[in-house]
Amino acid sequence: MDDLEKELGPLDDLEDDNDSSDDHSSIGTKKSKLPLVNPICEETLKETGFHQSMRACLEQIRDAMLHHRWQEAAEYMPCYSQMLEDTSHSTAQQSKELFWRISTEILHHHPNSRLEDYNNIYERMKHSGVKHYLMICLEHSFYLMLNGHIEDAKHQLSVAESWRHGKESAAQYQRTKLIQAYRSLLDYIIWCDKKFTHSKTDYHDAGDNQDMHSYFRQASVNLKEILKNPGVWDPFILSYVEMLEFYEDHDEALKVLNDYAYDNTFPPNPNAHVYLYQYLKRHNTTDKKLMKALKVLHVLVPSHELMLEYSSLLLQSEKKSDLQKALGVILEMLDFACWRGNVDVWKRLKAIIQKLQLQEDWKDVVSEKMAARKDWWPALHFTRFHASQDSEENPELKEVKASLTKILCPDLTLKYSAGQKTIVD
Amino acid sequence: MDYQFPPQLFPSFFNSGPPHSVLKHSAGDWGCYDRVIPQGDPGPLSSWTFTSRHQVRGEKWLHTEPVPVPLLSPQNAYLWPATPPDPQNFTEHMQNFFMDNCQDSFGCMSEILGENFNFNKRAREKCKTDSTHLTEVKKFLDMLKYKICQQTYTCKSLNAYSTLMSDVVHGIPPELLGALLHEELTEQRDRQLLCEGATGGSLAFIPFSQSDSRSQNGCLLYAGSQGLDKLNFHMVELQHHRGGSSCVDTGDSDPFCFQLKGPIRQISTASIFNEYCVGVRSPHLCGVWRFSERNEPHLLQVVNTKEVATCISISPHVLGEVLVVSESGVAKLWTVGRGMQTVREEDHNLYFNAKSSWRWCEFSAHPRVMLYADRTGVELTDIRVNPALCHTLFRISNTSGCRSGERLLLSRYLGNVHSFHHLISTQYSAYIMDERFPSVPMLKCDHMMQSPPIFCDVIPGSVFSGSAEDGAKTTKVLLGSHSSQEITMLQYSGGRAEACFSLGPPQALLRPKDSLKHLPVQIPHRLDTATNRLSSPATGLTSIQKKGGREAGADECICILQLTEAGDIFYQILEPEQRDASRPSTVEDEPLPQQGTKKQSRTTAEQLHSGSQLFASDTSSDEDVIGPTQGPTVQRLVPETQVKERELNVLSDASSEDSESARKGPKLRRMSLQVVVNDPELDPVSGLDADKKDENGSKNDTDNTEEPSGVGEMSSGSSSGLSHVAPVKLSNSTLVTWKHWLQKLTHWSREKKPRPHCLQHFTISTDDLLPLSDDDDDARDFTEEEHVQSLRSNLKACMSKRSLLVHRDIAASLGAPDVIPVPDPVDTEAWTDQLSHRLTISWQGEEVWREWWEDQLGLNREVKVEALRRKRRREKEAKRATGRRLELSGSFTSSVSYQSELSDFSDSTGWSSAASQGAWSENEGAGSQSEGFLEHGTPRASSPSTLQTDTPAPTPTATPQHVKEKQGDQQTRSGSHTLSLSQTPKPDSTPTSQRKNKRPPKDYLSSLFAPQDEPSQHDSYFLEEGSTMHPLTPPVAPPSSQLRSSQSVPLRTPRADLSQDAFSLSGFSQSLSQSSQGRLGLSQAKKKKSRMGF
């Protein structure tokens, strides 16, 4: 680790130096420990009066927009549009993107903005520069999707998909992939539409079926493709799996889900395991496999809702160790703030302990699990305040908890039960 | 339910490796939807809907006032300079150090050397005989107090001494001091740009549960006093009535104060079952207090940290558990009363070397898992096992969308919003992280702040308010920056049944430093003070949320409070945009139910003013009024019983006067302010106005009786055009609050002024130079005083009326000026004798007078004849010219003559131009001087000269030669003298015979001059003048003989303004022209030779 850091150190220094020289060019040669934000519109050396006034204009627009004075910002915009004519500036690309962002945001807040206005600005700015073409295309299609123009959005995405421009940067590569994936998602939606009408009419038409299948094929290529990239692809994988299930390609579905859940390059997405679990459950897999999936999820997210199911599975299991595991799972759930007042979990805990009490060494098992929690569980669950609150809000919970205090913390005298007494009295 | 995890997240790439993207534009993520996910059951195409990660519109929250309002009255504070120090200026600071601490810097050597130097002239005898006398040096050193030119004032001996001893006199070697100073300044600069230590902020609010629907009670915790080293627990109440007034009321309670031994950097709070735990961090001390609504705050424990503590965090799970991290990288779990336990130790930064020792710690959803953060990322640390089990929650290089150079600035556990959410802010963005899904941000918003945010506060949206219109569902994240005082509000929602999404673009909130432009104009020096004070960096941010109740009249609002380094707290209240335009304004009229009698009276007093607009008449009289009520604040000790309870030095706060002044508010207002009633039609709350109008009228009456002068008093309705034109109208109570605040601020700032660092100007006393006549001094003083007073009051009245002060208004007070009758004009015709005639003529000027003499003596007969002849010739020519076309030459000559006639320069013009053409051209300086002379000469020549048209070229010959004759053996001939001689153009053309012929009358003329002149001959005199160039001597110039007799008074004035050279020369050349004129008149054969001189 140390070596790695040393290795990384100078590299990072370089990066920092570059950065700070960028950042502070207006301030001086001073290097700050923390790279600060660029001044909004940096004054450049070779600046004409035009640039100065444009900068001032931009500052005004920005200020107005940050204070949500949209009217004022819109009034400045006609002046700022001159910036697009400027070719001398090295940052023309940025200024175009800036212009697009500002104008779109103003349109968002304009009371009378119309679809045509949006289309206009998207189309115009899209073609003003190659670097932001894909981004604007994507945003354009998002706009159309959000406004219910799914077909138009798909058209936009198809156009963008076929767009090629020289060497791709990493960001552009990712955008291309996203565009493809979103296009496939829309294919899936059309596929769903076809499936729906299909099932509704209950009329088998080979051509229609063929059409549907072609949508599936179109979608699956890109969806499969994007799932190879590390990332979060929840909507994509769900649609892909649904289509695979429809065509009963269970192997592929399972493989895709397994890859999504267990690939190490992917971020530890709890949903990946949830999807796998749900798929397995849908297809009546054995408890063992279900438990295996949930076990991994438990490691990742001990507070997950599915842990209740996990504990019930463990509880049903015949193995002795599983019962202890169930106890561990439930206790861990109760560590978290969000489960502390949940009656079901406490009841489950009671059930587990009741079953555990059938064994001889149950006290050891419980004290083993509670050893680490001894010094903070009482404060977390069994204070006088908890007692009064629980009895007020949820008497059932109070009852369950009170019955467990002696079992969980046998060595301590807790105010919780004492509180109960007073209430009983 | 917090345990739910969103079933679908927005798609995103997961990148690893250092980020490369650099933000090139400043638009953040404006106009972006970011990503969309489909929603809804698979069905027909139309059933599909999408949600975007960034939704276009959020809730609209509007300010109730266009300015933030100060909560407390200003306390004395030391302000850092607004601009960060420049490390390059260390020499200046060294100089200051040497001046301020001369004993420390030079004490040693001065003791050794002192015996041998003697600075005192008189004490020469006492000193050792061999001591060096340094009176000259002393004199020079005295001069150093003033702003003087360092080049002009040098002291040779001092220079010699400094060369000799500069390396020994310093107590601290300047190289070392300079290096240290430079380092310190660099650090200070860094600190001003980003104050790491202040992260978290020393302002917090704990809401009390027992609040009714109309107000929100709670305890405001803030750092106060000059060094921000006093911890205050102040009970406050947020009152808000839709359409009416909203304010944060500090009530009548004094704050509970604890004096600490260091500046408070961070206040962290947690509440568990209405027991409140407060952790306070100052650089080397951390303390924990506990209080509840019923119990007063008391200190539980204080720990001393060896290293500078960078974070304190109170556990929201277990009462009395605190996390403390220091710069050494050691995180400790401090169980109050039981001791500390090291839970994590890091020598390095987590992921890469960010060269920062800043660490941060927070609790998480699990009581035994904590967050450990530094500039590079955040790790979740499970402290149940040893060594702690860690995994990454956030990492600059792993999180998608991170930019190059991005660093983590702040992390905050959002336990009250969502038990698994954390807010992480960098200088570009704010991230919402879910600890169940580490490494991938649930949400990323660009906050678009200029300076890095290091304070934050979160206002949870009500999860359950699905029924109430979608007004308050969003969670608001407030980010505050240090130096620029920015506050930005972001809105987001989700995280449970649906993925997180942000709503609307970031909204910048009001800053105290911008508030002055919304307030009445301040006079400049107050403006300076106020601007400085208001732009001191922020050191804390918190908010009060008032939830809307079910019943009517209980509207929700949020109040955002900001603490500045000067110790001022400013608040701004936001309320959601109203659906209906009509504002129920009647709410204010109802007396508030749960207020004491005192408060009630206060509100009624405020209501008295609510319809009126108050004008700040910002003159010194205000200070006089505010003076006695302010008084010197005395810090009084609280009763001993309380002192015993506390372990630290507890002092009650002087700010009890706040409440006092607040109570005195109406009275003060009556005393110091002029009440101006607004036109009811223009006032948005006109209904109220109608009710209050009578009261205001009566109030005006009382004011009138109190102030007999009636300055600035206005009848109602006349100020209708003067209301503020702000989008949100500034309310009167706010205006009054601000006015008092600014007054008190001025009061403070007047009392304490820092040592002026700039040098005094070198001044010469002019008291004795222009003494005023001291006769009847007292009497005049008295009347004048009266006049001034009445004038002032009149002026004030006019200013408040916005009219002009004209003589008509003040005539009464001044009285009619005494009219001095103009004497009758002298009837010169009455005297017929020659002497009288001559004298009368002499009033008209020298030339006229000379002419008279020439006429009298018959000297100008030839001239006249010539003029006549010329006239005839011209007439003849004119006749001819009408007959045929004009010749070029003719037109030229005529134009020349025309020019010379037109120009007012008279002879001197021609002369100077001739001279500059001639020998003068060899001296450029002289040329410019001649111009000066010309300019000067112009007004002089206003007396009409009949000789204008004469060619000047030949004339000078006479004068210099004449001069030569008289002063032929003048020995000392300076350059200017030769110059004056060289002016003589080669006058070969001048017929000498003429001169000879005209000798007698000329002599006669000169003899005529003689008695009027100075003792010496005027020619010789002007020659002297030419050589020595001392023009200030009384005999100004030969013509002055005449000038003095005739025009001395009007001519002197312009002369005094002239520079010496121009003056002397002008005098000189005037004399030349004068004499030449004389001769001209006598000698010149009158021929039209105007071009000759050119």
Image: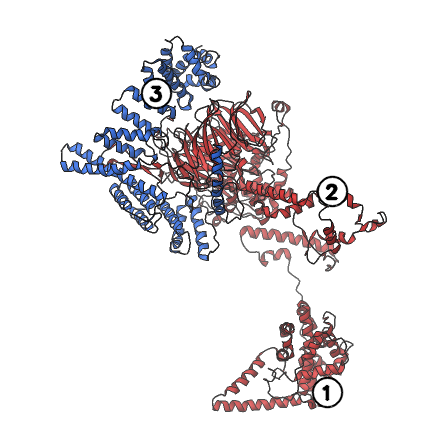
Query: Given the image, what chain letter belongs to the residue carrying mark 3?
Result: A
Q: Sequence order check: which comes first, mark 2 or mark 1? A: 2
Q: Quadrant of the N terminus of chain B?
A: top left
Q: Looking at the picture, which amino acid does disc 1 mark?
A: Pro
| Disc ID at residue A308 | 3
Q: Which residue is mark 2?
A: B107
Gap between marks 3 and 2 measured at Cα: 79 Å
Instruction: Name the image quarter holding residue A247.
Output: top left
How are the colours assigned in the image?
by chain
| Chain that the image shows in red | B
Q: Looking at the picture, which amino acid does disc 2 mark?
A: Gly
B273 vs B36, nearest the viewer:
B36
Q: Is residue B1074 left or right of residue B372?
A: right
Q: Residue at x 58, y 36 (%)?
A: B661
Does the CB distance between marks 2 and 1 fall below 8 Å? no
Query: Given the image, what chain letter belongs to the residue carrying mark 1?
Result: B
| Chain that the image shows in blue | A
Q: Secondary structure at mark 1?
A: helix
- Residue B30 percent across, percent down from the top left: 39, 43
On the same chain: label 3 and label 1? no
Mark 3 surroundings: few (<14), some (14-19) or many (≥20) residues within 10 A: some
Q: Secondary structure at mark 2?
A: helix
- Residue B537 percent across, percent down from the top left: 54, 40
- Residue B599 percent across, percent down from the top left: 53, 31
Q: Looking at the picture, which amino acid does disc 3 mark?
A: Leu
